[in-house]
Amino acid sequence: MKKLIYFMAVLTVTYSCKTTQDLETITPEPVVVNIDLVNVQNDKVKVTLDPGKLTGAQTTFYIPKTVPGTYSVDNYGKFIENMKAFDYLGKELLVARKDDNSWLIDNAENMDKITYWVNDSFDVEGEEGVFSPAGTNIEKDKNFMLNLHGFVGYFENLTEQPYKLVIHRPTGLIAGTSLQISHSTTQQGPPGTTIESYNTKRYFEVVDNPIMYAKPDTTSINIQDMKVLLNVYSPNNVYTTKDIKAGVEEMISAQKEFLGEIDNTSNYAILLYLSDLEEMDARGFGALEHHTSTVVVLPETMPLDALKTTITDVVSHEFFHILTPLNIHSNEIHYFDYNEPKMSKHLWMYEGVTEYFANLFQVNQNLISNDEFYDRISNKIESSKNFNDSIPFTVMSENILEEPYKSDYYNVYLKGALIGMALDIKLRELSNGGMGILDMMKKLSEKYGKNKPFEDEALIPAIVSLTYPEIQIFFDTYVSGTTPIPYAEFLEKVGVNYENNQINTSYFIKGQIPYIDGNPETGALFFRNNITLNSFLEQLGIKNGDVIKSVNEAEYTIANVYELVMKSQSWSEGEDIQMMLLRDGEELVLTGKITQPTDSQIKLKEADLPETDSKVKLRNAWLKN
């Protein structure tokens, strides 16, 4: 789901009150939402919402506290201002704000509509901690990133009602979305306004279908009966769809070939927002998946080759979510509570297996070599060791919104993927190469499907019944249990040797693993906590968590981190270096000499075995079948 990216690798309730009676609509009319993108005021957008006829003395209106896939509490209601409710005569009703995300409205049976203004997260310093691909942008006449959970709320007990979205947009901007327009009209005269309508079956479909409005830069790709819409917004026109279309087409073609008949998606949209780091703009880079679309936010300053590689890795992860959790998921996800969420135990599958597939398909479809695949796996093993390896993954997953588990979230993409790999190898071993984890997921898809959620406790027994009894031991030991996975033992089964070597590294990156990261809220660069630093950084006196203020008197932030990395490539051994840091709130200056950084590295290498060896046959089944 939320695919966090280290930028370098790219990189209280005040009171409560229940309603006096349950509310219901008298007619099956849809909840009608009007969003005005034309008459923007102070970078805010007005929303008018008509829920139809209600009954009851009071009702509560909600803006989501969290949404599926983010695994974080974001409180989107903080961006809502001037909430008002009106009766059928236009008279204001009493509205009391209960907390960040809910409002109590009196005289609900006479309420006609509510109105409120929405501020966007991109323009707020630090984005209030909202992950950019789940955030919102309001830039009059240029760009509107409508992650609709930030614009559209719901009344209690009305999440299963149909919703009709009516969006008033500048005629010069077009919509990027997988939603189908049900009606469109264009008004003549300034300002040019086009009114578009979208119909959805329930509130979930509103949240599940982001829309990005921007000047036209779209292209369609038809791949094996699936239409893929690629929509790019580059504020300084650095890149267009033409720059990345071929790579996206190759990637999704390979993914569909890998998935086979398991894919039932006919339309898919990729919405790419490229952030201008010189302005107050998005700072959290990565992607957030939906059933039929993905929102991607990356820095506009990325070199084209890095952009293409990142899109392949990030978007392929999000696309594989059409398998899980979108097609295989628990009640906690199917009946998601946007303001009192209950989390599933199975992040190992939703995110871990998805991340594993995002790498496995590339070697399976010959987009990368075996050695490149092994390097990715070794990087995940190394990085995951910086987290607590004895925490049961099911416990972490179920409590992911709380500390201390919240701090281990990134390990979902590391050890979670490695759980997928180990399970895949175990299944291949038990089936003599005939069954892998993709086959297991296909069986789960047939058993459940997107409209049939499972009970959280029932998933592992279902997997065991569809595979082998020994798989229960695997889960009890490595997923629900506290035993670290013996990666060397699993890899040895497929003829891959596990070695620890001493290598030279760059000053701030080891292979694909950065030693530094950035805080999107402040723009500050810091040395990561969950990592062992290289010899140069240790000798200089750097400690994990130190914030970089300047290097050789040049100041650095997220905005110019690439300059730091590029400049370090020309450093020579023996040269003087000065680094100003912020440690525990106090400034300090470290000085020393440039030395060649070294670090230990796990190296995975295929054993020299004949093609007829059983381990080689099992490896071929693992990587190529």
Image (cartoon, helix red, strand yellow):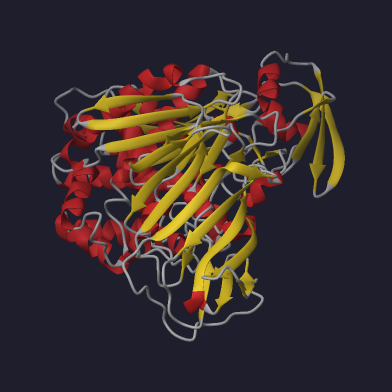
Percent coordinates x, y for residue 312 in the rendering: 40, 28
Count of marks placed on residues: 0
Residue drawn at 43 percent across, 29 percent down: 231
Which percent across, then down, holds residue 488?
36, 40
Q: Based on the displayed image, in which of its 4 quarters is residue 144 positioned? A: top right
Question: Residue 596 at what x, y percent from top left?
Answer: 67, 21
Residue at the (61%, 23%) spot, across then down: 301
x and y percentages locating residue 562 in the rendered image: 65, 23
Residue located 46% across and 55% down the image:
33
> Is residue 178 in sight in this rendering?
yes
Figure check: 285 above or below 238: below
Residue 400 makes an appearance in the image: no
Between 17 and 452, the one lying in front of the other is 17
Rendered position, 28 above or below 182: below
- Taking depth in this image into account, of 307 and 109 the one nearest to the observer is 109
Q: Is residue 72 above or below residue 246?
A: below
Looking at the image, which residue sits at the far bottom? Answer: 20
> For this view, does 196 lie left or right of residue 36?
left
- Image quadrant in which the C terminus is located: top left
